[in-house]
Image (cartoon, rainbow, N blue to C red):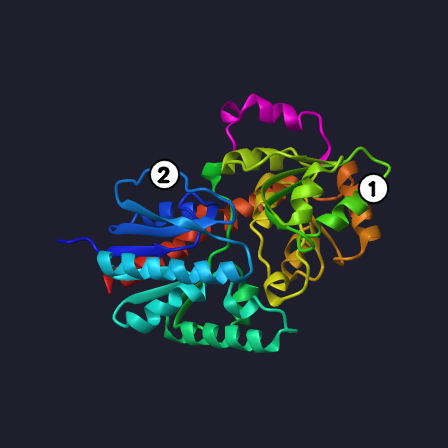
Amino acid sequence: MTRPRVCYIYSEQPDYVRSEKVLKTLTELEADFFYIGCCRGNQRKRPIQSKSNQKYFVADFSIPHGGFLSALNTLRFICYAIYKVLKIQPKLIIAVNEELALPFVIFFPTKKVICEAYDSLSMRSSKKRKILNNILKTVSRFVLSKCNALVEVSADRLNAHEIKPPKSLVVPNSLNKENYPDIKTIPEKLKSIVSNKKYIFVSGSFSDNINGLEELLKAIELLDDDLTVIAAGRPNGKWVNTEFIRHRLVRYIGVLSSSEATFVASKSKALFAYYKPISDLYKYAAPNKIFDAMALGVPILMNKECFASRFPEDNAFGLSASYEDINLLSKNLGIVSSGALKYNPSEVIKLFEAQYEWSVTSKKYKELVNFFLQN
C-alpha cells in the first residue's frame, strides 16, 4: 500500500530548532515527509542530508527580516512551495503561519491543511497601522476558517484567535531532552568562555530596540557587580551588529547548536527574554526560553507587558519589570546575580519534565497528524 505523503512548509531550514523537533516527532508515523523551506536573514543554505522518510527541499534564496524585500521573497517562497506541492501531491499539508497556508486553502481544497502558528498574522501589525492591521487580521480569520486544524504555542495565543478550526491545540515550543548537553561533546573553547563567569544569556534572533538589549546594558551598568552578557544567535539590525555585540560587557559567540546553547544557558545566572510591547505579537510572545529555563532550573527575566511572564513568576523562577523600567531591571539583575532569588530549581525541573518537556507535549501533535493520515 502506498504510504501517505505530508508536506511541511516553513520559511526556515530543516535543522531550525522547532522544525527539527516537529519533523523528528512526526516521522515516527507511517508516512513520507517532505520539508519545503528556505533561508532567513543573512543565512546561507546549509548542507543537510535527507533521511529515510524525510526529504528536504530548501530554496536557494533568503527572506530578510522585515521590509519590502521580506514581503517580495515571501511571495517568491510561496510560489516555490506551490510548485513543490504540485509535484509531491501530499495528502496533508502543514504550513507555518497563515500566509504560507493561504494558497493551499484556496487552490487545494481537497487537501487537509494544518496551520502551525509561530507568528500569527493577526498579531503582527501595530494597532497604529490600522489599515495593515485590518488586512492581516482578515487574512488570518479567512485562513483559519478554511484550515482543518490550528497548532498554537500557548493557551493565551490560541484564545486570542477570533476564529479557530474544528481541531485546535497548544503545543509549547519546549525543550527536547535529547538536546540536553552531553559535557563530552561541548567544545573546550566554549567551556572556557563560560568558565567562572557571571553572565546573563541572550539567545535566538535579537534586534534593535525590540528585545530590550539597550535596557539590559543600561541596567547592568547601574550595578556594582561583575555581571556580563553572553549572546548567541542571529543579530538583526545596525545597532545590534555594530554596538551591542562589540560592547565591553558583551561576549558574542555566534550561532550555536541546540546542545551548545543549552550548555551555555545552564551555566548562566539567568536567561533574558524581553519583547517591546509594540504589537500583539510581542505581548503574546511565548518564548521557548521559558521552558529552557525550567528544564535547567535557571531563572528568567522578562518584561511585564509580555503575558507569558506570569507563568515563571507564578512558579517562582522568573522576575519581571516594565519594559522601560531600567531601575527595576537592574534590581532584578542584582537578585539573580547574587543568587538571592528564592526558588527550588529541582522542583521547577520536576514540573517541566512531568508536564512540558517536548516528548510529553508533542504527543498531541502526533495524534493530530495521525488522525488526518488515517481519515
Is residue 183 magenta-colored? yes
Residue 52 falls in which quadrant of the image? top left
Is residue 235 magenta-colored? no
Query: Label 2 sits on what residue type?
Result: Ile
Q: Give left or right: position of 330 versus 134.
A: right
Q: Label 1, on which residue?
A: 221
Q: Residue at x 66, y 73 (%)?
A: 128
Q: What secondary structure is marked by label 2? A: loop
Position of residue 41 measured from the top left corner of the image (x, y, whole percent) = 52, 49
Q: What secondary structure is marked by label 1? A: helix
Please rate how many residues cluster around mark 2, counting C-alpha atoms within 10 Å: few if below 14, some from 14 to 19, many from 20: few
Q: Residue at x 51, y 76 (%)?
A: 135
Q: Residue at x 81, y 52 (%)?
A: 326
Query: Label 1 sits on what residue type?
Result: Glu
Which residues are the magenta region? 181-199
Q: Label 2, on which residue?
A: 48
* 288 or 211, nearer to the observer: 211
Q: Residue furthest left?
A: 1
* 23 or 338, nearer to the observer: 23
Residue 255 falls in which quadrant of the image? top right
Report if the CB atoms under discs 1 and 2 are less than 8 Å apart.
no
- Mark drawn on residue 371: none
Q: Give the spatial CA distance, label 1 vs label 2.
A: 42 Å
Position of residue 124 measured from the top left corner of the image (x, y, whole percent) = 56, 66
Q: Residue at x 52, y 32 (%)?
A: 181
